[in-house]
Amino acid sequence: MIDIVVVLRAEDAVLDFLSVLADDRGGETRVILGDRAEALTLPAGTDLAERLDLLAPYVGPVAGHITSPGPDALAGLIRDADADAGTGAGRPVRIWTHSPADNRRSRGRLGRDTAIACAGPGQGPVRHAVGYSPYLQFLSDLDRPLDRRLIAAKLDFVNRSCGHLLAEEAPEYVVQTPRIPATERFFDTEPDQRERLFALLASLDDEAASVVDPWEFGSSPYESERLDATAAWVRDRCPATDGTLVEVGACEGALTHRLAAAGFAVRATEPNPVFRPRLAAALAGAGAVTVDDADLAGLAKEDGGPRAAAHLLIEMLYYGQDLALLDDLATDLVFVALEPDALRTRVRPWLERSTTWRADGEVVLVPPRVETVCAGRAYLSKRGSVGLLLRRTAAS
């Protein structure tokens, strides 16, 4: 048996895979360092202290942004490590790597790329470390509690070789207590589950759109309740006869469908170039619905067009948008929905200073709930959604 551990940086091999390095069967281990695109051999018969001494010189300072070398390069590194170890003579190989949902995006990407690199025939199984996951709890397939000897070895390595990372400013690379697990946990994934885990931790870039319905609006009971309640709230406060709704950031149309079914004319805007074709396809034949690429800033710049009955900013004001843009929207009514803390800390202080908008009612759309995601591989707490209706003041 040969173990191949694929990590972004050398310290990761110790922080998340020490139990693999310490496997007492005495076989050879290869560590592939993604930041260097090279493999390090830990020979058969070397004890743990010797293996850690071989890794220590590769723990360098953080120099700029580090990312995965990509599936093709990783496939070549794994293939070469496999061949050099002589596994073609019949020795099985196991691949260990980061979780595609590691909250450190650089590690998550490498974990995903490694699994893609190993998807071909003849490749060994891939096992992902749970790693750093402050938002998800995982159902793991293998848990390895470390005994006092291994914990001592891990902490000694951190203090001797990673001291500069204990005070590292970059959140992706700093070494802190939650990133030094006392129990190393691992899980296996199927391709669809892997892609969903990777997309779930993305923001609004193309990586979030790498799978259809990344936030599981179509399958989650929580999301279904939230969307139904949101549509009912809009319907109660803004009759369909009042004019067109502008839904900002419509994603793939889960809410748009509900609004169209309630008789609204909807302008669904979606700036993401991957989500937008899916949105248009999903809404084909859905009634009086149009789709375009405007974002909040673009809508605020529009001049001379018809005023909308309302603008809908539903679960989308999490990304640093300038709330002053709302003043220039061609409407007198804005529906805002956010999790309670974001509404309290981000919108309420701005609203207290605003001379353009006043609150015209607040409603709990859905309370917090804990729910499984990615076909039950993990679960997380969803924080609830509160709707706040903003009405333009007469003076403005």
Image (cartoon, rainbow, N blue to C red):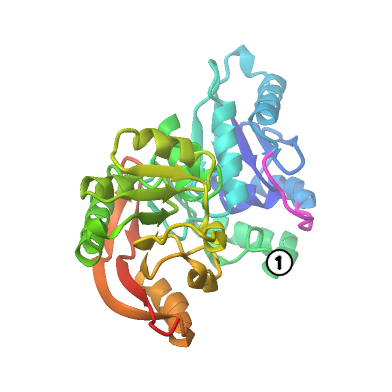
Q: Nearer the viewer, residue 132 or 47?
A: 132
Q: Residue furthest top?
A: 89
- Label 1: few (<14), some (14–19) or many (≥20) C-alpha neighbours in 10 Å: some
Please, is residue 60 above or below residue 339 in the view? above
Please, is residue 395 above or below residue 3 in the view? below
Q: Nearer the viewer, residue 265 or 280?
A: 265
Please, is residue 1 above or below residue 376 in the view? above
Q: Position of residue 328 (x, y in %)?
A: 51, 69
Name the residue located 68 percent from the left edge and 68 percent from the top edge. 166
Q: Position of residue 321 (x, y in %)?
A: 54, 66
Q: Position of residue 192 (x, y in %)?
A: 42, 32
Q: Is residue 107 left or right of residue 277?
A: right
- The answer to whether residue 157 is seen in the rendering is yes
Name the residue located 53 percent from the left edge and 74 percent from the top edge. 324
Which quarter of the image is occupied by the N terminus?
A: top right
Q: Is residue 227 left or right of residue 200?
A: left
Q: Is residue 67 magenta?
A: yes
Q: Nearer the viewer, residue 92 or 169?
A: 169
Please, is residue 27 above or below residue 232 in the view? above
Q: Main secondary structure of the magenta part?
A: loop
Q: Position of residue 379 (x, y in %)?
A: 34, 52
User: Please, what is the three-letter code of the amino acid marked with disc 1?
Assistant: Glu
Name the residue located 29 percent from the left edge and 44 percent from the top edge. 257
Which residue is under mark 1?
168
Q: Is residue 339 magenta?
A: no
Segment tinted magenta in the rendering? 59-68
Q: Secondary structure at mark 1?
A: loop
Which quarter of the image is occupied by the C terminus?
A: bottom left
- All told, the count of numbered labels is 1
